[in-house]
Amino acid sequence: MGGSFLSTGYFQNLLGLLAVVMLLSLILERALAVPFEWTPIEGRLTRFRLRAPIAFLVSWWIVGYAKFDLIAAMFSREWSDAFSAGAIITAGLIAGGSKGAMVLFQGVLGFGKEAVAARVAAATQNAQSTAPAATSSSSGGGQSAAPFWRP
């Protein structure tokens, strides 16, 4: 990621790195969902508050395995080791970043279940309120025909 901090290439690379962090966060969250939600150990994980430390350790292992240091990459530095401040911060971003990514997708971009359900309900209500009123047909003997989408 050499070059000026104000160059287009720098920002493109930075966005690519942030996309990697976000994808790793989502992958980590989904991968840990199975053991975290498994009934025999779910109570212990909650009682002893072990979810965050386990997520951090797994993400720290991933950072060390992939030699991925976001902070070093942002400043065009080489990977030093898994115990560097940048690697630890990157692991923390990956471990805690899934919540931020979920907030981004669900709250800001509106991709969550609740947001989709609210949009469907609003569209249904809007369609019902703006639907043309059923009129009597000339050949139906004065009976009104209900639209096929209404019960």
Image (tube, rainbow, N blue to C red):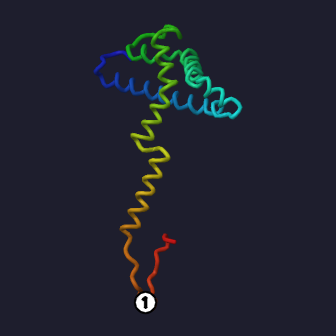
Which residue does the image show at 47% across and 27% down from the upper left? 97
19 up-or-down from 3: above or below: below
Residue farthest to the left, as pictured: 6
Where's the N terminus, which quadrant? Answer: top left
121 up-or-down from 112: above or below: below
Residue 116, image x, y percentages:
46, 50
Residue 48, image x, y percentages:
61, 23
Which sits in the foreground, 74 or 56? 56
Which residue does the image show at 47% across and 18% down from the upper left? 90
Label 1 environment density (alpha carbons within 10 Å; few <14, some 14–19, many ≥20): few
| Label 1 element class | loop
Which sits in the foreground, 53 or 130? 53
Residue pointed to by mark 1: 142
Left or right: 7 as drawn, with respect to 33: left
Residue 114, image x, y percentages:
47, 47
22 up-or-down from 70: above or below: below
Give residue 77's quadrant in the image.
Answer: top left
Residue 151, image x, y percentages:
52, 72
Which residue does the image show at 51% across and 28% down from the upper left? 25
What kind of residue is marked 1? Gly
Left or right: 113 as drawn, with respect to 43: left
Give residue 66's quadrant in the image.
Answer: top right
92 up-or-down from 140: above or below: above
Tally the marks.
1
Residue farthest to the front, as pictured: 47
Give residue 58's quadrant in the image.
Answer: top right
Which residue does the image show at 40% across and 89% down from the upper left? 138
